[in-house]
Amino acid sequence: MRILEKNGIPYRANYYSCGEFIDGIHIADLLGQPYEQTFKTLVSVGKSGRYFVFVIPIALELDLKAAAKSVGEKSIELLHVKDLKDVTGYIRGGCTAIGMKKPYPTVIDASFADFDEIIISGGALGVQLFITPENFVKATGAKAEHITVEGGLTA
C-alpha cells in the first residue's frame, strides 16, 4: 500500500479476520466476493532459472504452456511454497505482485479487463486491495495474456 500511495495510485483496502489461510476460494466465500473478480498471485521459475509472476482468477488454474509462452520460456514450474518468502518477501495467502523483493516480469490473465476493479492480496493475511485494472498494470508493469484453464485450485 505504501508503494501505491508513494506513486499516487488509488486503491481501496479491505481488512478481514484470517486465522489460518486455506485458499482464495475460502476467503471469497467468507467475504461474499465473486471468484472471477478475485485474483491470486502465483510465482514460477522458468527453465532459464528466472522467476515470473502470474495473476489469475482464484477458481482457475494456470495454463503452464500458455504462461511459459507469454514470458518466452520453454517451460515453467510453480515455485515451492517453502521458497515463496525468500523469493518474494511474502507468505502464502499474502503474496501480491506489488512490492516483491525484486520486480519480476508479471502477467495477468486477460479476463481482468472485464472488471472496473479487481481484488488482489494486500501483501499480508487479512488484507485485500481493490484496484482498477489500469492501476494494477501501472503498479506492476504487468502484461495481459490468456494464461488460464478451467477448474483448478492451484494455490
Image (spheres, helix red, strand yellow):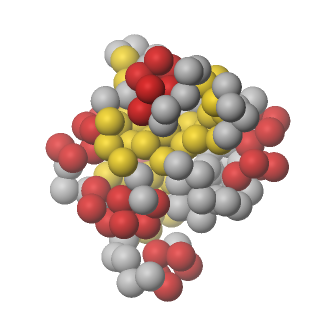
Q: Residue at x 28, y 56 (%)?
A: 133
Q: Position of residue 26 (x, y in %)?
A: 50, 33
Question: Taking 118 as reference, is 61 left or right?
Answer: right
Residue 16 visible (yes or no): no
Which image quadrant for residue 110? top left
Which image quadrant for residue 84? top right
Q: Residue at x 72, y 34 (%)?
A: 49
Q: Is 5 above or below relative to 155?
A: below
Q: Residue at x 46, y 75 (%)?
A: 4
In depth, the one of 136 and 48 nearer the eye is 48
Which image quadrant for residue 150? top left
Q: Residue at x 67, y 60 (%)?
A: 102
Q: Is 149 above or below relative to 16?
A: above
Q: Position of residue 31 (x, y in %)?
A: 41, 46
Q: Is 29 above or below relative to 153?
A: below
Q: Which quadrant, please, contains the C terminus?
A: top right
Q: Position of residue 92 (x, y in %)?
A: 68, 42
Q: Position of residue 67 (x, y in %)?
A: 46, 28
In depth, the one of 146 and 56 nearer the eye is 146
Residue 79 visible (yes or no): yes
